[in-house]
Every structure is written in C-alpha cells, then in structure tokens.
Image (spheres, rainbow, N blue to C red):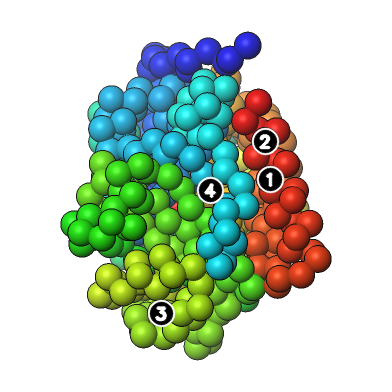
C-alpha cells in the first residue's frame, strides 16, 4: 500500500510558560528548516546569519522523497512545485557511455507517496526563508556568532549567542546550524575541529539550455528530464535539468588538487575539460558549452562525540555542522531538513521551559538522528569507492549489482 500524502502541519499555540525562545545560528537550508518546524510547534525563533543578505548561491540540489515529504508537510508544496523538476529516470552510465541501469523515479516517488524534486538551491532557500518569516521568524543578517555562554537560574538554563560585533542574544535554546565549517561545533567541543578531507573535489556548473536545444543529441537532456550519473575510474559526473528546463546543472567529481587552505576557487575550464576528454562524447560536448566553473573541495564530518548538545540543554547543533557528508547520495540537505523537522517535533513535546524538559527533548532528538546521519556519511564514503572503481572484475560486479538494485526498486 502506498504511503498517504503528508498532512500539512498547522501552527500550534502555546502559553508563555512553555513557549521557548530559540536562536538559530545560520540561515542555510538546515537552519531555516529548523526555524519552520520549531515555529510550527508554537515557539519563538530568531535567526542570526553572518551573510549580509540571503542571496542566490549554490547550484542544483536534488530532494529525495524523504525530504519532499517534510517540505510538503511544512505547507511548501505550492511555493516549491512551481520551481521543481521531477526527473523521470535516474540513469547509471559507464564512463564510456554504456547504460548500466535506470530507476523509474516517477514510479518510485509514487511508491514513497512524495516526489523527487530537483531545484536551483536559491529557489528552495527562498521558499524556506519566506515560510519561516511568514510563521514569525526574525532574521538578523551581518551577525557572526563567535561564542556561546550560559546562564543558570533555578530549574532553567539559558544560552547567549555572542556575535563578533559584541551583540549578545539570550535564548532558552541556541541551535548551531552554521554548516560544514561550523564555529558552533567547535564551541560545543571546546577545541578546534576542522572537517576531514575526502580526496575529492566538485566542479559545479550551470549551462543555459538554449545552446543545448540547438544540438539534436543534447536537446533530449532538456526535453526529457532525467538524472544521469556517469561513473568511471577515480571520477564521476552528474547532471539534471533545473527551472523547468531553463538551466542544466552539472557536477563533476574528481581527485582533489586544490592548494591547502582554499575550499572554493574559480576553476579552470580547460583543465576540467581535459579530465573528461576521453569519456562518453556527450560529456565533452556539454563541457564545450561551459564558460566558467567553480571548484569545491569536498569534506566530511563523520560524527560528533560525545553528544550533539551541551549538558546545560541550552545549546545543540544540526545539519552539516554535525554530519557533513559527501554529496554522492544527494542527501546532505535532506539530512539537515530531517534534523530540523525532528528537533521541532521534540521541542513541541516540552511541557515547560525547564532544563529537565529541554534535556529530554534534546536526548530524543539526538537518538533519532545520530545513527541515521552517521550511516549516510559512511554510505557516502562507500559510494565514493564504488563510483570510482577502475574497469575490471570489481567494476563488472558493481554494474551487475546496480542493475539488480534498480530492478528491485522498480517493483
Ligand atoms: P549551510 O546550508 O551551509 O548553511 C550554513 C549557514 O550558516 C550559512 O548561511 C552560513 O552563512 C551561516 N553561518 C556560518 N557560520 C556562521 C556564524 N559563525 N554565524 C552565523 N551564521 C553562520 N544535498 C542534498 O540533499 N542534495 C543534493 O543534491 C546535494 N548536492 C550537493 C552538491 C555539492 C557539490 C555539495 C558540496 C553539496 C551538496 N549537497 C546536497 C549538500 C547540501 O548542500 C548541504 O548538506 C546543506 O546545504 C547543509 O545545510 P546546512 O544548513 O547544514 O548548512
């Protein structure tokens, strides 16, 4: 039996004695998602964001049915479906162009009860921001959080988010959603804790599909939206259509050759093309249309010990700050949205503002999220190995299993 369509969560009312003041650090996908979920449970939310404004950053982002279920339950179906592309198939293709397997995303989405959606990140980001503000979030930009302090009074604990400009924001709970290079994580741990290198980097580029439409071979990528993964020795490439066919998103995953210290750089288009010169001729053809490109070093955060929350129960973290993963399962943003959803539900169950109630909520939040997110990070690492296997027996076995897996999921 197919799962039912998600119910839209209605905003709850709370009296002042149980209404928490929550400060979220970071207005990224995870921070905004958490804001929506916490506001729907009837608490107050303010968001501190270091950037001067919420701009058009990033490129494509795939949302799998687990995250579209949450987005729909937050009342975002109308706002998002107009920007979403729902790909028909997900194809696995060998680096020389031979099709390995395909999975019917329409059918699989129907089985899950919610669709696969591909977005330009900016559309998803703006829809989350607008919904958070509509529900009552207060956003303060130009605010870099540099420290968290605590205040204890009777059975209650409060946290103070301290900003670089000296401003101090007192809350019942501070939530660090400040991404992969998280300051909040270091504050929680009490020491430096840089993300780990993975040995890979991503070239990210967006093509205007007008040029593609002039080529009989490339126009089918636009007319029949599909997600394509080309997998080959030490590298892979992913592409899909965005914004109703106006943009074509490509991500090329290759060995990391970036200098120490830099995590994003303008890339050299010629160097990028050379890496794929011998691949399926459709890739060099697509790359010939590229004018500029960005390089992102790919890093991870496998786990956070001993716990995700401060013993005061006034400070916790979520998203990439807790468990950044390789993007090879297209699940990092999805995990951040799930974190926010679960955190909101757990805070929704608090009866008052006591440390005891918050501790219970944060314990359940972590117990629900830790194992799943750590599994996604380690599966992402396994995917790196499997996608980048060199031609030979192991690659043949991988391709056989991929084909079996696709058949299994099509049923
Ligand atoms: P972010 O979105 O990074 O947000 C952090 C926010 O905190 C930012 O706004 C930042 O400015 C702010 N901030 C930072 N420090 C401070 C501070 N000290 N004070 C105040 N504010 C601060 N995920 C998917 O689900 N599907 C995909 O298809 C996908 N593709 C990807 C492709 C690539 C190449 C990469 C690199 C990632 C991809 N991801 C994908 C992963 C996804 O982008 C991240 O997992 C997700 O954005 C994490 O959300 P977040 O809110 O934790 O962090």
Residue 138 at x, y = what percent? Answer: 28, 39
Q: Please, what secondary structure does the residue beneath circle 3 have?
A: helix
Residue 91 at x, y = what percent? Answer: 53, 48
Question: Is the residue marked by circle 4 packed among few (<14), some (14-19), or many (20+) residues within 10 Å?
Answer: many
Answer above or below: position of 406 versus 356: below
Residue 146 at x, y = what percent? Answer: 44, 64
- The picture quadrant where one finds residue 339 is top right
Q: CA distance from mark 3 to mark 1?
A: 29 Å
Answer above or below: position of 233 versus 341: below
- The picture quadrant where one finds residue 249 is bottom left
Q: Circles 2 and 1: CB distance less than 8 Å?
A: yes
N-terminal-most mark, 3 or 4: 4
- Residue 403 numbered tag: 1
Q: Quadrant of the N terminus?
A: top right
Q: Nearer the viewer, residue 28 or 227?
A: 227
- Mark 3 or mark 1, which is nearer to you? 1
- Residue 407 numbered tag: 2
Left-right relation of 310 to 289: right
Q: Please, what secondary structure does the residue beneath circle 1 have?
A: helix
Q: Quadrant of the C terminus?
A: top right
N-terminal-most mark, 4 or 2: 4
Answer above or below: position of 183 versus 363: below
Q: CA distance from mark 3 to mark 4?
A: 22 Å
> Does the rendering let one see residue 344?
no
Q: Please, what secondary structure does the residue beneath circle 2 have?
A: helix
């Amino acid at each position: 039996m197919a799962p039912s369509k998600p119910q839209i969560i209605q905003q709850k009312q709370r009296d002042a004695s149980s209404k928490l003041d929550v400060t979220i650090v970071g207005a990224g996908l995870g921070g905004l998602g958490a804001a929506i979920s916490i506001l729907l449970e009837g608490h107050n939310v303010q968001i501190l964001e270091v950037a001067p404004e919420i701009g058009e950053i990033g490129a494509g982002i795939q949302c799998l049915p687990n995250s579209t279920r949450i987005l729909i339950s937050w009342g975002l179906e109308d706002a998002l479906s107009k920007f979403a592309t729902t790909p028909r198939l997900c194809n696995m293709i060998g680096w020389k162009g031979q099709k390995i397997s395909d999975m019917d995303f329409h059918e699989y989405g129907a089985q899950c009860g919610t669709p696969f959606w591909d977005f330009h990140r900016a559309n998803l980001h703006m829809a989350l921001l607008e919904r958070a503000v509509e529900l009552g979030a207060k956003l303060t930009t130009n605010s870099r959080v540099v420290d968290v302090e605590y205040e204890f009074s009777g059975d209650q604990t409060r946290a103070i988010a301290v900003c670089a400009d000296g401003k101090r924001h007192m809350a019942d709970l501070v939530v660090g959603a400040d991404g992969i290079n998280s300051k909040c994580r270091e504050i929680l741990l009490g020491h430096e804790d840089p993300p780990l290198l993975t040995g890979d980097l991503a070239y990210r580029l967006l093509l205007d599909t007008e040029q593609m439409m002039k080529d009989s071979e490339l126009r089918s990528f636009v007319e029949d939206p599909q997600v394509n993964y080309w997998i080959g020795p030490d590298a892979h490439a992913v592409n899909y259509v965005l914004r109703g066919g106006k943009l074509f998103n490509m991500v090329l995953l290759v060995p990391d050759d970036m200098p120490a210290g830099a995590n994003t750089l303008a890339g050299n288009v010629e160097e990028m093309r050379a890496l794929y010169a011998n691949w399926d001729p459709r890739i060099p053809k697509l790359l010939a249309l590229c004018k500029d490109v960005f390089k992102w070093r790919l890093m991870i955060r496998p786990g956070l010990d001993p716990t995700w929350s401060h013993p005061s129960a006034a400070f916790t973290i979520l998203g990439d700050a807790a468990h950044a993963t390789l993007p090879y399962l297209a699940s990092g943003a999805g995990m951040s949205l799930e974190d926010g959803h679960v955190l909101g539900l757990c805070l929704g169950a608090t009866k008052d503002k006591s440390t005891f109630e918050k501790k219970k909520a944060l314990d359940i939040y972590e117990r629900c999220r830790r194992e799943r997110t750590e599994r996604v990070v380690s599966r992402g690492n396994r995917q790196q190995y499997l996608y980048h296997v060199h031609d030979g027996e192991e690659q043949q076995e991988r391709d056989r299993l991929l084909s079996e897996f696709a058949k299994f999921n099509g049923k």
